[in-house]
Amino acid sequence: MDAVRLVWVLPVAAISIIVIKNYTTTDSLKGKGKRHGLTLPPGPSRWQAIKDLLTMDDSQPWLLFSQWTKRYGGLTYADFPGQRVLFLDSENAIRELMENRSSKYSGRPEAPTMSLYGWGFTTSNLPYNDKWRQHRRFYQHGLHSEGVLKWRPFQLQSAHTLSLNLLNNPEHIIEHIVTFTASTIMAALYGYTTLPNDDPLLDIVLRAISIFVESTSTLNILIFSAFFRRLKIYGVEHFPAWLPGLKFYRNAATSRELAREMMDTPFEFVKQSITNGSAQPSMVYEILTKPLEDRESKLLDEQIIKEAAASGLSAGIETTSSSIIAFFLAMAMHPGVQERAQTEIDAVIGKGRLPNFDDRPALPYVEAVFRETVRWFQASPMGKCAPHATTDDDTYNGFFIPKKTTVFVNIWALAHDESKYRDPHTFDPSRFLTPEENLNDDNMQYVFGFGRRVCPGRYLAEASMWIAIATILSVFKIGKAKNEHGEDIEVALKFTPGQVMCVTPMHLYGSIK
């Protein structure tokens, strides 16, 4: 057989084997469920699911999954080649399975593309095992609800720097927001102070994250990961990179190098700072300077510290930045909301100083703006920040849920549930206020995930978002940019594909109140 024919015959043969094996596996699962007197949850046929997935808007996959759950119910089961998937958007089912039965639903599906891209070390991609528990112990050291209070001075200073950067260079809103978010996280993790512009370490991190976001699109997870897992057996690494479906293979080497730099460089910065006596307080510093015997018995070795810290850095920058950018967009689209929030700040704080964290209880409408921002826009609409996986067979409401099922929690559907939120597509902070203008009990914590996989950095993230929102509202009036005719340039909420959702760049300007 000539080489050209071999190039095409091998992939086709491998895909055929995958499909045949998948049919056999699915039939086996159905039989297993029937032996328990149960069936799999309802859902689209195998081929309909694949067709829908390949034709959906890959920047908003949650819309397709919401359509499925409306058609088939709050538990929707879909069968892809080599991968069985459960979609949840019923709050009762989510809390029962993700929280009350978290021991069975805290796993992670196999993600070969993550390892290929060099991101298999991250906390969000680890299976539910001892290494994952060590990562969580690292976060618990400095990111629990009381522990994050010591990072507030860094967050406050970074918010002031953000305002100065916006004042001096308002056309680079996106870059300033990313620098703000990164500076707070890098200060807490490494005691590192980012430069206002062109920070070399931040550049490494952002380039690594950019490729990571590309590799974690929902389509990649559900289709390419499943095929890659099987195809690797047949030597996919020897196939030409230009073959259909193998585009992701091309960037893998660069991604692995950047991920390694992102992990090693800030960690070595802390070690060098300890050596020369210039180290600032940080989570990595505090753990590394503990007595070795104490660290080994109660905490972690250096590799675990390095991996966990890099995981927190990569996860926090993209999600928090996207949420703050969405806030800017919301204020440009809803000037009445902005004006009401600024009136509250002026009444409570006055014009002689900027807000601080002590002001938060006295600013209920600003708090409502923060809550509505994370409801209206979810940086990780399909869960923080990756799908779950079942670690054992389970049953729920008369349905059989097999072991090793990938489970997507549709956070977007929860945040746009019409039975809970009136006119959910409208940005309306007043939905979080009582008739007496006090905050209601809906604190939007579900956007940070459920059960044992809840986001460990949630307290740091929400504090950074709140102080950024309050500070910006106290200083700037956010509006739409003008075209050459002096007319407003319209803006809208749009997304880029990936497990972490990013708002696409939009035209905004900041002007002093």
Image: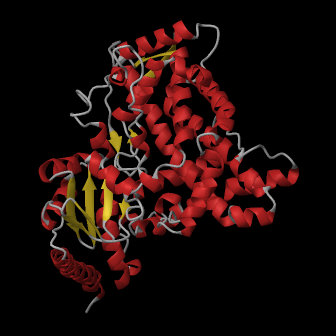
In the image, taking residue 441 as reference, residue 412 lies left or right, namely: left
Say above or below: 97 vs 331: below
The residue lying toward the viewer, choosing from 146 and 462, is: 146
User: Percent x, y for residue 458?
Assistant: 51, 42
For the point 68% across and 61% down, the residue is: 299
State which quadrant residue 24 falls in.
Answer: bottom left
In the image, taking residue 75 as reference, residue 343 lies left or right, namely: right
Say above or below: 336 vs 447: above
In the image, taking residue 347 as reference, residue 420 lies left or right, namely: left
Residue 462 seen from this side: yes
For the point 65% across and 36% down, the residue is: 149
User: Percent x, y for residue 415?
Assistant: 31, 37
The residue lying toward the viewer, choosing from 427 and 128, is: 128
User: Percent x, y for residue 33?
Assistant: 19, 74
Say above or below: 25 vs 72: below
In the image, taking residue 74 as reference, residue 294 lies left or right, namely: right
Residue furthest out toward the right? 276
The residue lying toward the viewer, choosing from 317 and 470, is: 470
For the point 17% across and 75% down, the residue is: 30
User: Percent x, y for residue 81?
Assistant: 24, 72
For the point 47% across and 66% down, the residue is: 128
The residue lying toward the viewer, choosing from 395 and 327, is: 395
